[in-house]
Amino acid sequence: EMGTTGIHAELAKRRKAVLPDWLTTMYAEPIDIERGEGRHVRDAEGNRYLDFFGGILTTMTGHALPEVTAAVSEQAGKILHSSTLYLNRPMIELAERVAEVSGIDDPRVFFTTSGTEANDTALLLATGYRASNQVLALRNSYHGRSFSSMAVTGNRSWSPTSLSPVQTFYVHGSRRRGTPMAGLSDAELTEACVADLEDVLDQLHGNVACLIAEPIQGVGGFATPPDGLYARFKEVLDRHGILWVSDEVQTGWGRTGEHFWGWQAHDGSGKPDIVTFAKGLGNGLSIGGVVARAEVMNSVAANSISTFGGSPVTAAGALANLDYLLEHDLQRNAAHTGAILRAELDGALGSASAVADVRGKGLMIGVELVDPDGLPAPELAAEVLEETKRQGVLIGKGGLNGNVLRIAPPLSVTESEVREGARVLLDALNKVSSSRHA
Ligand code: PMP
């Protein structure tokens, strides 16, 4: 058993005294996280955990990767500068690399410090370009915590307020238990979502800046739209000149295995006008950004500067991280180990009655839990999380009702590690379900 020491309890108390109530921690006894190594993290008491959530999908190549650490310390030894007003080699090199892999035509890259700020920038670009502050987003979405990114979020835990700076209209984009969309086939769902989009656009006379959407909804519980749906959306948007913004904060950099970007599962004419990214690029360093066609990026009339976005230390670390990912073809590893993980977890669909759905792509897999009446089971999910932690594996949870387990290891995870993680998760599921029915 991994218990709480006096020092740990004291730290939890201090945290509560200084930080806001709405800044929640995971687990009844939050982990006093101290160091990482590869796919593992250690707490201050020396307990070792297999990290299958990677700080909400930030750990892309692995913890304490020597290549990233070396790049960060080398740059820190030169200058800890932040202003982006001067020529900054790491930022330019990173922008070149991101542009190369972006898949966007005539790409321009702007760096920010977070996914929130990246989406805020995308909204600045799209609303200005289109001279409209009406925006489309998907139900069940999450795009950030700021005034404008919350305004396009479709989750009651982060809902827009009546004071929001853009007017958002929500359309359907995926199947969700308990909604009329739940029972549809992929083909039926696609037609229903496209009709919904057309209907909303008709109401708005097409006067809309953009549609912003996640290729797989992260916070929304890895809700996965049918392949090709966003390409169909794009066809409709194109008729009105509306921009398509792909929020790749969770799905970018090969995490979905079969594609480098999540939007590529929706090919055809589905190429986005703007892609936003963050999380994995920095491997824990705070960097995000936007890549867009030059015509869109350069449409901003006034200057827009981020003092810290793409500063030398974060850019150097991110560049080493991205180079490592590309050199080791971690996208392929994500596809390979993701398929193994998926096969192991698919078994749970048949054996554990609480498992209503296993979904996602590559190393982004969601397991939806329900009670015997088929209703969302958030308490069960919370108990499974505690049990996996007790057994030394960290996973996440999400979904509108908090009943979806989220599994997202670093993209360097090995076959034996995914088997180990899956074994612990299935064991925890069985243990918790049987104790509840006893
Ligand atoms: N977009 C998506 C899809 C996200 O998952 C998140 C973070 N969970 C964000 C945006 C916001 O990113 P950040 O927390 O870095 O501001």
Image: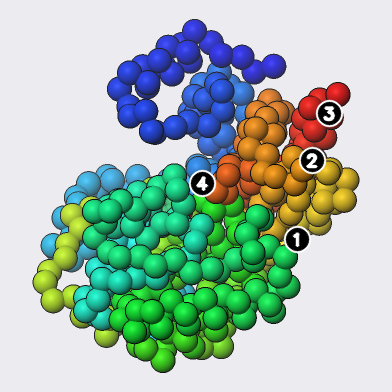
- Amino acid at pointer 4: Ile
Label whose residue precedes the other's in the sequence (3 or 4): 4
Q: Is residue 302 visible?
A: yes
**Residue 176 placement (x, y as % from top left):** 63, 59
Q: Which residue is labeled 4 in the image?
A: 56
Q: Is residue 230 visible?
A: no
Q: Which residue is labeled 2 in the image?
A: 372
Q: Nearer the viewer, mark 2 or mark 1?
A: 2
Q: Residue at x 43, y 76 (%)?
A: 200
Q: Residue at x 37, y 28 (%)?
A: 21
110 relative position to 236: left or right: left
- Amino acid at pointer 1: Ala
Q: Nearer the viewer, mark 2 or mark 3?
A: 2
Q: Which residue is labeled 1 in the image?
A: 339
Distance between the alpha carbons at the discs numbered 4 and 1:
20 Å
- Tell me if label 4 and label 1 are in contact, CB under 8 Å: no
Mark 2 CB near ligand 1 (8 Å cut):
no
Label whose residue precedes the other's in the sequence (2 or 3): 2
- Tell me if label 3 and label 4 are in contact, CB under 8 Å: no
Classify the position of the N terminus by image quarter: top right
**Residue 110 placement (x, y as % from top left):** 28, 67
Looking at the rendered structure, the number of numbered marks drawn on it comes to 4
